[in-house]
Image (cartoon, rainbow, N blue to C red):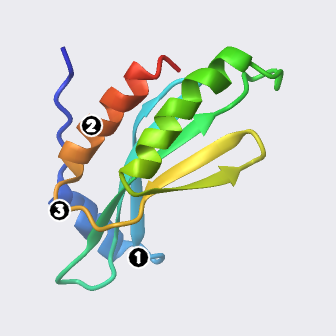
């Protein structure tokens, strides 16, 4: 059973507007293999944009190559790419995946992404 993810879009928008960077980010879930978070950018006070970010660690903490993790990550990365996420390397052993199109309901997208990541068995 998938846990319902509730995100207060109004609160995220307000935090982004109050931030000097005009952006805010909230981490929703973190494991040794991945991190999922959601954020808001205050492009304009009337219409903030929301984004979902997934960071996928390609190696364990000891930085040893984990072929099984790489095999499991590839289908997940392909699904994220197909959903319109940009994929970029981060810190050499992580891939940052972020939405590129504005989200109307970040809660629904987070729920879908959590399901994709869980199915990948990372």
52 versus 68 height, above or below: below
Q: Are marks 2 and 1 in contact (CB under 8 Å)?
A: no
Q: Position of residue 39 (x, y in %)?
A: 36, 57
Q: Whole-Å distance between the Cαs marked 1 and 3?
A: 18 Å
Q: Identify which residue, 114 or 70, lies in the foreground.
A: 70
Q: Position of residue 24 (x, y in %)?
A: 40, 62
Q: Residues within 10 Å of mark 3 (few under 14, many from 20)?
A: few
Q: Which residue is mark 2?
A: 112
Q: Earlier in the sequence, mark 3 or mark 2?
A: 3
Rendered image quadrant of residue 69: top right
Q: Which residue is mark 1?
A: 22
Q: Which residue is mark 3?
A: 104
Q: How many marks?
A: 3
Placement of the N terminus among the 4 image quadrants: top left
Can residue 53 be seen in this snapshot? no
56 versus 48 height, above or below: above
Can residue 83 be seen in this snapshot? yes
Foreground disc of the pair 2, 1:
2
88 versus 73 height, above or below: below
Q: Whole-Å distance between the Cαs marked 2 and 1?
A: 26 Å
Q: Whole-Å distance between the Cαs marked 3 and 2?
A: 14 Å
Residue occupying image coordinates x 67% and y 41%: 94
Residue occupying image coordinates x 19% and y 44%: 108
Q: Position of residue 100 (x, y in %)?
A: 40, 65
Q: Residues within 10 Å of mark 1 (few under 14, many from 20)?
A: some
């Amino acid at each position: 059973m998938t846990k319902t993810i509730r995100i207060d879009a109004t609160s995220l928008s307000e935090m982004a507007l109050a931030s000097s960077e005009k952006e805010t980010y909230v981490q929703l879930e973190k494991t040794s293999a991945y991190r999922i978070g959601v954020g808001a950018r205050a492009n304009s006070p009337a219409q903030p944009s929301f984004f979902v970010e997934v960071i996928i660690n390609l190696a364990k903490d000891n930085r040893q190559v984990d072929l099984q993790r790489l095999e499991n990550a590839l289908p997940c990365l392909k699904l994220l790419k197909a959903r319109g996420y940009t994929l970029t390397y981060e810190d050499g052993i992580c891939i940052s995946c972020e939405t590129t199109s504005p989200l109307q309901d970040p809660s629904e997208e987070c729920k879908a992404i959590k399901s994709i990541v869980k199915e990948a068995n990372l």
